[in-house]
Amino acid sequence: MRPADLAREHGLSTQAVRNYERDSFLPPADRTPSGYRIYTERHAAALRTYLALVSGYGHATGGRIMTAVHADRLDQALAAIDRGHAQLLRDRETLAAVREAVDHLTAGPATPTEPAEPAERLLRLPGPLGIGDLAHRLGLTPATLRTWEAAGILTPPRDRATDHRRYHPDDVRDAELAHLLRRGGYPLTHIATVVRQIRTAGGTDTLAEALDAWHHRLTTRGRSMLTAATRLDAYLALGSGAPRS
């Protein structure tokens, strides 16, 4: 096969195919005496696998997985896949927790026989968190949390003695929601509006639409991960994936 043959199947440019080989997303190709690349079905399978991984895990992770496979570091590739599934599960749990929070906030005051005890996972914390603790929990940097605060998304109170930010359960919930929507591609101005809505428990139509859209994205990503796993398993069956010495 020629680079154009691989490219045509996926609507890519031939240069993109060459770049994928250069970056080790494809195994190295043999050359003709005149220097032209010779691609085989193994290269075609590698390209299908890489593009499926990109759809499920993103460009960076998909690239890391294929690079690890071609360097004969299967454990690293599988660890990257595990992290992707762990993130997807965390997103699902966060989405479910936010939905519960919305239900709790919009249900009205609790009756004397039904104490107002938030059931969502996000509120089960040992105590207020510092900015470093919250950043670690979300896998972000403290600078990102400060940016969200400047955008009106977070409003943590300050410790009177130290002036340090203290993130209480409601603040953590807001940060989790912001992180969820940010990964969904929403701009900070939109996220600030949504967070204000959940704080006031009023006008939740926009919030419901945003959560429904993200739920659809999570489902699509989960299906894409299944497809990618099938592709990767088939590709691994073609050989060890290690480059030639």
Image (spheres, grey):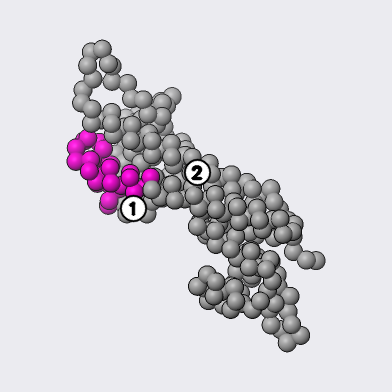
Q: Can residue 61 be seen in this view?
A: no
Seen in the image, is 146 located left or right of residue 226?
Answer: left
Q: Would you place residue 202 above or below residue 63 in this image? A: above
Q: What residue type is labelled 2?
A: Gln
Q: In which quadrant of the rendered view does residue 106 lie?
A: top left
> Mark 2 sits on what residue?
87
Name the secondary structure under disc 2.
helix
Please report the residue visible at 31 percent of the width from the left and 41 percent of the height from the top: 154
Q: Residue 36 carries which label?
A: none
Q: Residue at x 71, y 55 (%)?
A: 237
The residue most toward the top is 113
Residue 202 screen position, x and y as percent: 19, 37
Tell me where residue 121 appears, x and y as whole percent.
41, 29
Check if mark 1's residue and mark 2's residue have beta carbons within 8 Å.
no
First in sequence, mark 1 or 2: give its number.
2
For the record, the magenta segment spans 189-215
Whole-percent x and y of residue 60? 54, 58
Left/right placement of residue 27 relative to residue 103 reads: right
Q: Mark 1 points at which residue?
A: 186
Which residue is nearer to you in this view: 115 or 157?
Answer: 115
Query: For the residue marked with disc 1, what is the amino acid?
Result: Tyr
